[in-house]
Amino acid sequence: MEKIRIKGIIPPMITPLESMNRLDVEGLERLIEHILDGGVHGLFILGTTGEAQSLSYDLRYELIERVCDQVAGRVPVLVGITDTSLYESVQMADRAYKCGASAVVSAPPYYYAPAQQELIDFYLGLADMLPLPLFLYNMPSHVKVVFEPDTVKAIAQHPNVIGLKDSSANLVYFHSLIQAMKSHPGFSLLMGPEELTAESVLMGGDGGVNGGANMFPKLYVDMYNAAVAQDIDEVRSLQDRIMAISNSVYKVGRYGSSYLKGVKCTCSLLGICNDFMALPFQKFNAPERAKLKNILEGLGVDVVNP
């Protein structure tokens, strides 16, 4: 299997929907081109931001096919295969491989939290079965377990395991991973929270899987490039804008899903795609949408679909 290195800004793409089990196909096509036009370095589908766990398998398969066909090798496509069923994870990976994806991404099976040795055994076994390189996905808030640094080192011994996306929002943990993986220079460490991506890259990380890049991809690419260049003044300037988005767009309403509602609604206000959300979540109501419109206008963003 060809060894690849994933670096840069790899947006976790939202899944444009018209209804619970129907894609907003035209919106999906516009969204892909909007993101790629921002200069991103890859695309990650069927992650948390993509509402993967709320989608039927048929819809997930359709999404993989459509995204891979449209991207057509312009950037690597990473496909989320997280599942409580090993069989379903492998089936999803096989479909991703057949469609031309570059790698797959897996968070630990959720419900019963596995022990660290169980994680090692599970992922070494999964990596043996996959037709594509594997990214680990550290998401303790959702799956109730953390990949400890020594566990990551053990799993990374497998040649098919090429990196980790960290969504813990714990910089101490991320720095520990950087130290632990110095003996694996080809192993990619990507930051999930966009608020921490610049600092993580300055300290040796490889990039970010930033949800805000659905809306404003060039902003996050510019931030990454400035961090790689160690241009601290530019990083500070761009970080101010990223934090302004985080502290406003993602804070509308009192929902655990406010971040995702904000991203989807913004993409709708920008005229890119539908903001329908898969149950149990629902899109913003009219007053919340109007509030977000005012926030965006205050940030200097042109709203075309109020």
Image (cartoon, rainbow, N blue to C red):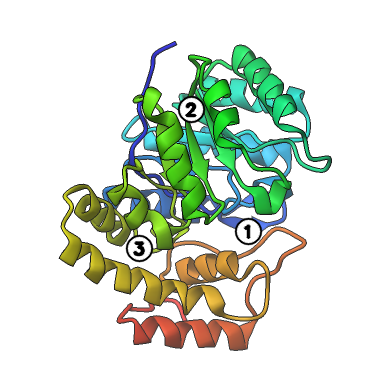
Three-letter residue code for mark 3: Phe
Q: Nearer the viewer, mark 1 or mark 2?
A: 2
Q: Which residue is mark 3?
A: 216
Query: Is disc 2 surrounded by few (<14), some (14 to 19) or many (20+) residues within 10 Å?
Result: many
N-terminal of the pair, mark 1 or mark 3, is: 1
Q: Secondary structure at mark 1?
A: strand
Q: Which residue is mark 2?
A: 103
Three-letter residue code for mark 2: Ala
Q: Nearer the viewer, residue 230 or 142?
A: 230
Q: Nearer the viewer, residue 16 or 160?
A: 160
Pointer 3 with pointer 2, Cβ within 8 A: no
Q: Quadrant of residue 112?
A: top right
Instruction: State whether residue 106 is above or below residue 98.
Output: below
Q: From where the camera sits, is residue 55 visible?
A: no
CA gap, disc 3 and disc 2 = 24 Å
Q: Position of residue 191 (x, y in %)?
A: 44, 48
Q: Position of residue 169 (x, y in %)?
A: 52, 56
Q: Which residue is mark 1?
A: 18
CA gap, disc 1 and disc 2 = 27 Å
Residue 52 appears left or right of 266: right
Pointer 1 with pointer 3, Cβ within 8 A: no
Q: Secondary structure at mark 3?
A: loop
